[in-house]
């Protein structure tokens, strides 16, 4: 029951990083997003990334709707090294999901985002469910900072063996229609 939460001891850190600070030491896949589309707003724009040429690695499944556009999505360790395609981490090792995004609605020079994350075991047991980790940004963030979303997850201990964890995420525009949803498998050794 709720014991699983205590047993796994998962922690999540969320960081929104500005473009100027995240391009240091990155690979080509992690380049700065292309054209800005801050003013683009559409209720019917459904785009499954990959088919539209977005750079997606680490077997991240992702979908953008409502005018949001993901230019790239990939996993790194906090030091900037790219996570191998098998998405393997050690106990206590942080994994950072990096989303390079365009299409958020700008209001009075600010963007208002929400971000949720859910982590479940390979058996479907939910061990973490954070509905909105961006509540502390109620005054909004700059449009430049909203172009790069980073969400960290770490498994601090594991008393039982699992084949993998499914990390699901959702980032949405609180003032517009843009929504990004997706997930990836994290394997812990």
Image (cartoon, helix red, strand yellow):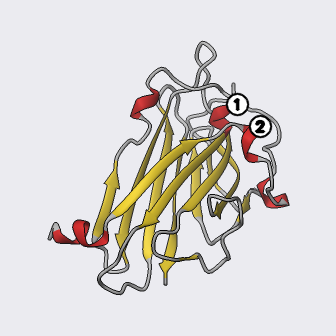
Q: Secondary structure at mark 2?
A: helix
In the picture as drawn, the residue positioned furthest to the right comes out as 28
79 on left or right of 87: right
**Comes first in the chain, label 2 or label 1:** 2
> With respect to residue 187, does 142 lie above or below?
above
Residue drawn at (50%, 44%) of the image: 171
Residue drawn at (30%, 65%) of the image: 127
> With respect to residue 105, does 102 lie above or below?
below
Q: Are marks 2 and 1 in contact (CB under 8 Å)?
A: yes
Give the CA separation, mark 2 to mark 1. 9 Å
In the picture as drawn, the residue positioned furthest to the top comes out as 108
| Nearest to the observer: residue 87 or residue 175 | 87
| Nearest to the observer: residue 109 or residue 162 | 162
Residue drawn at (55%, 38%) of the image: 178
Which quadrant is home to the N terminus? Answer: bottom left
From the image, state whether disc 2 or disc 1 is nearer to you.
Answer: 2
For the residue carrying disc 1, how many other residues have a C-alpha within 10 Å: few (<14), some (14-19), or many (20+)? some
12 on left or right of 4: right
Q: Secondary structure at mark 1?
A: loop
Mark 1 lies on residue = 144
Kindly identify which numbered label has been placed on residue 56.
none
For the residue carrying disc 2, how many other residues have a C-alpha within 10 Å: few (<14), some (14-19), or many (20+)? few
Residue 159 percent coordinates (x, y): 29, 82
| Nearest to the observer: residue 138 or residue 37 | 138
Residue 146 percent coordinates (x, y): 63, 34
In the picture as drawn, the residue positioned furthest to the left comes out as 1
| Nearest to the observer: residue 36 or residue 27 | 27
Quadrant for residue 164, please give it: bottom left
Mark 2 lies on residue = 20
2 on left or right of 150: left
Residue 109 percent coordinates (x, y): 63, 16
């Amino acid at each position: 029951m709720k014991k699983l939460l205590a047993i796994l001891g998962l922690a999540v850190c969320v960081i929104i990083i500005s473009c100027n600070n995240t391009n240091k030491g990155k690979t080509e896949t992690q380049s700065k997003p292309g054209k800005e589309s801050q003013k683009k707003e559409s209720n019917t724009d459904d785009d499954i990334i990959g088919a539209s040429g977005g750079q997606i690695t680490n077997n991240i499944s992702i979908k953008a709707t409502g005018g949001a556009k993901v230019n790239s999505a990939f996993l790194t360790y906090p030091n900037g090294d790219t996570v191998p395609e098998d998405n393997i981490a050690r106990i206590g090792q942080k994994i950072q999901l990096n989303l390079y995004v365009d299409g958020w609605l700008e209001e009075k020079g600010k963007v208002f985002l929400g971000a949720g994350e859910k982590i479940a075991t390979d058996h479907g047991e939910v061990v973490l469910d954070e509905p909105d980790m961006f509540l502390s940004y109620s005054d909004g963030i700059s449009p430049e900072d909203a172009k790069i979303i980073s969400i960290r997850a770490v498994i601090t201990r594991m008393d039982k063996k699992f084949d993998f964890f499914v990390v699901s995420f959702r980032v949405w525009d609180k003032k517009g229609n843009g929504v990004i949803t997706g997930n990836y498998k994290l394997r812990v050794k």
